[in-house]
Amino acid sequence: ERRDRVQVAAALLPVHEKTNQLAVLPAPHRVTRTGRGATLARRVPAGSKFVFQQHYTPVGRQQSDVTKVGLLFAEADDVTHELLTLIGIDQDFEIPPRSSEFAVDLRVPRLPAHGQLLSAAPHMHWRGKSFRLFARHHGDRHHADRHHGDREVLLEVPRYDFNWQHNYHFKQPIPLEAIDALEATVVFDNSSGNPANPNPDEFVMWGDQTWEEMAVAFFGVALPLTPPSSERVEAGPSTVAQPDATVAARAEELTQQFIRRFDRDGDHMVSRDETPRALRRFGFWQIDDNLDNQLTRDEILRHATRRVRANK
């Protein structure tokens, strides 16, 4: 049946070759809204494909990939929040040899106004040393004890370890309405003092293999399917047209900007090859509704409209 589904849990399940034991699926995420529990789910558009990127490293003998995938679906009427993943990423760094404290900054500048930040998952490789996540507020300085200028520290990982790929869940969801941007600093140790460092004499750049590096963080965000009650308006003849027109105008502006930026051959579409590597890997499929590796104007406009509405 071709219809949108909502997915409340998913996991890559490593299966032991000898025991054939499966990992347990995580329970559905829960957030708090006006004192009541709420169920989160990811929207899975009809016709979607799940794409998994596995990074293999030769070890000198034949191996088997026995990974399995588990999905748990819910009825749309039972879901109160959509679960989104925002990404902060920098792929243009170069770590010099023997540097023990090389910092790379990440930023997520566009946040859904009514969203709640649930979790943060930093990702680096062997040279990863530390991670710090900030919230840049609207000039708010009342968190003086933990502020760096107008930035509040949300998470500190002072001793990052590649062997532990933690997804840090905040004790309470963090409202995003008063936050301008999420900013993070990742620090790498390419010195001989790092016992995991494969070669302190190398220049190190972005790459899939563990002797290369990544500077990326994934953020779990809950977005209510209906706006907060204080912001709902009983629509009459004079209250409907203006908000819709505003959304449409902004979405059209973003669509034109996107096409001007990436449409190198002037065909008024954006092919996968025309986009930068970060967009190809992490965002292209979210816009490419029919999965043909071409972004039409209509696809870009639909995605822009969803983003504008989410940020209102």
Image (cartoon, rainbow, N blue to C red):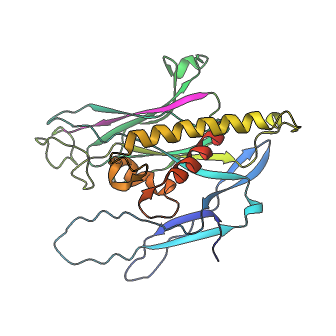
Above or below: residue 101 compared with residue 15? above
Which residue is painted at 63% across and 73% down in the image? 2
Where is residue 258? Give x, y as percent. Answer: 45, 41
Q: In this figure, what is the number of numbered marks? A: 0
Where is residue 309? Give x, y as percent. Answer: 66, 41
Q: Nearer the viewer, residue 84 or 117?
A: 84
Where is residue 118? Give x, y as percent. Answer: 59, 44
Q: Is residue 188 magenta?
A: yes
Which residue is painted at 55% across and 65% down in the image? 10
**Among the 4 quarters of the image, the one containing residue 99:** top left
Please identify the quadrant where the N terminus is shown.
Answer: bottom right
Q: Would residue 35 be visible to someone looking at this image?
A: yes
Which residue is painted at 20% across and 46% down in the image? 197
**View extreme (left): residue:** 201
Q: Nearer the viewer, residue 132 or 70?
A: 70
Give the residues in magenta.
179-190
Q: Main secondary structure of the magenta part?
A: strand
Position of residue 148 in the picture relative to residue 206 (left or right): right
Position of residue 263 in the picture relative to residue 13 (left or right): left
Where is residue 90? Give x, y as percent. Answer: 34, 39
Position of residue 77 in the picture relative to residue 310 (left or right): right
Q: Would residue 165 be visible to someone looking at this image?
A: no
Q: Is residue 89 magenta?
A: no
Please identify the quadrant where the C terminus is shown.
Answer: top right
Above or below: residue 126 compared with residue 49? above
Position of residue 153 in the picture relative to residue 138 (left or right): left
